[in-house]
Amino acid sequence: MTHWIVAPIVLPAMLAAILVLVARFHISLQRILSVAGTVVLFAIAAGLFWQASDGTISVYQLGHWQAPFGVVLVADRLSTLMVLVTATLAPLVLLYAIGSGWDTRGQHFHPLYQFQLMGIMGAFLTGDAFNLFVFFEVLLIASYGLMIHAGGAARLRAGTQYVLYNLLGSTLFLFALGTIYAQTGTLNMADLAVRVAELDPANSAGIRVAAVLLLLVFAVKAAILPLHFWLPSSYAEAPAPVAALFAIMTKVGAYGIIRTYTLIFPPDLEITQGLFDTWLMPAALLTLALGMIGVLGARRIDRQVAFAVIGSMGMLLSAVAVFTPAGITAALYYAIHSTFATAALFLLVDVLRDRRNAVGVWLNDAVPVTGGPLVAGMFFVAAIAMTGLPPLSGFVGKLLIMDAARESNLVWWVWGTVLVGSLIAVVGFSRAGSQIFWRAHQVASAQEADPESEANEVNTKDNSAPEPALPMVAIGTLLALLVALTVFAGPMTRNLSATAAQLFNTDPYIAAVLSKPGKTIKDDHADEAAHDATYTDTEEGH
């Protein structure tokens, strides 16, 4: 049993405590420790991903308590992939926060940031449904503090809305877990997979209710219509680094759906037949449509990006709703792409807010922003990626989703919604880009002709001070990751295809979690539909 599996959880937890107790009043020391911690976290995540890349499923038993009685962490292809994506995003967002000074605008930014990472990593690595709830609460508590960092009435109001909606999701989660435990007597995911498969469909009303409740819980986390209302204001009003880190938060909801409904409630299980075709697919398509319409109608660039997040989650979950290996492969590729694209856009929005002075994030006329060509180029690349125009990764992801949707009964609805939604998003981001970067030059020419105009007084800003380079480095690296995701789309999709195949073959996961020294697992393939397993105790041969 390797202790590296628990390191992505323990490292940020211990670092957060040290930052609070030792470096509370020393911002420079906080920055050094926080950056060093996220770099080490990335190295550990890369090592775990490499270890799982050959199909190895590693299990960590806390206190050496055997599952299902003890708490276990599981590192397979999916969990290590999501841990690596989070660990890649974390140092870049942190560098932006330091370079822009966001970490000094309120108290305890760095400890809360580390606690947030702890919760996200734990949610991806846990092999127990109750501990998934625990880690959800850890990351949500930290996100509450990060949401209201630097204060402000609008931020506090959005944070309150964020808290209320997520408390509703947490309450539903507890109801679902209580129902599952009452029906099965366990909350270990591998053990649940075995026991749920053995339930009599004629007497499974409770587990059906639990399956629907869990889907609602993860829909709240993933901001799926009609449970999306908390996201636009929350993400738009949050500090830019926080909103950029939140790009991975909605993916936690998508991860929960993928993990739960491939392992515990697989697609061939009679108990949950029709759940995705009947409910998830229509909700995902409506979410996609609503998000893209919001992109077109938004009057502020930060809300435009927030609605793009909603649209991207609809796009992602329409691939999940197909619920085939091809659909999960497309969903995972698009999840990685949208995480980096969303983070880059939120950071660029903060740059525009700072450099456009009084106009800020409103799509109104203003003088050209400082460093206009560089910022405009970055915005152009990020917008192309988010809207799915060729040749960047968004285009590849949408092609994968449309190809996977051919196996769905709603294929034409998926294709039509994806194509029309993409067109609407292109129009929306084109309008924003032309308003900010093109029409600004017309305003500048008019102000030169009338230097005493009111607009000139409002928009004039002292540009003599040099702009910090660290924020641009962070944004540029995120865009470079999108380019790399495009260039290496072939190897990436092969890896994700292997991940999807592992998800749909649940026997190795169950065996890795429930086996122990002296116990062998004999697969019983007499009934392929049940994917049942027989466990036979044997004596050790030594």
Image (cartoon, rainbow, N blue to C red):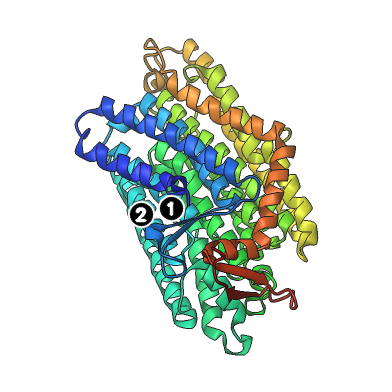
Q: 425 or 385, which is in the foreground? A: 385
For mark 2, does the 10 Å Cα neighbourhood hold few (<14), some (14 to 19), or many (20 or more) residues?
Answer: some
Image height check: is 193 above or below 374?
Answer: below
Whether residue 464 sits left or right of residue 344 in the image: it is left
Q: Residue at x 46, y 28 (%)?
A: 352
Q: Residue at x 70, y 34 (%)?
A: 488
Q: Residue at x 69, y 76 (%)?
A: 530
Task: Using the rendered view, name the quadrant where residue 205 is placed.
Answer: bottom right
Label 1 vs label 2, nearer the camera: 1
Q: Earlier in the sequence, mark 1 or mark 2?
A: 1
Q: Residue furthest front?
A: 542
Residue 100: x percent and y percent?
A: 38, 26
Residue 449: x percent and y percent?
A: 49, 11
Q: Could you give the CA–CA distance between mark 1 and mark 2, rounded to whole angstroms? A: 9 Å
Q: Are marks 1 and 2 in contact (CB under 8 Å)?
A: yes
Q: Quadrant of the C terminus?
A: bottom right
Count of labels shown? 2
Whether residue 255 sits left or right of residue 273 in the image: it is left
Residue 504: x percent and y percent?
A: 68, 62
Residue 53 visible at all: yes
Residue 177: x percent and y percent?
A: 44, 73
Q: Which mark is residue 368?
A: none
| Amino acid under disc 2 | Val
Residue bearing mark 1? 122
Q: Which mark is residue 138?
A: 2
Q: Secondary structure at mark 1?
A: helix
Q: 451 or 389, which is in the foreground? A: 389
For mark 1, does the 10 Å Cα neighbourhood hold few (<14), some (14 to 19), or many (20 or more) residues?
Answer: many
| Amino acid under disc 1 | Gly
Image height check: is 405 above or below 104?
Answer: below
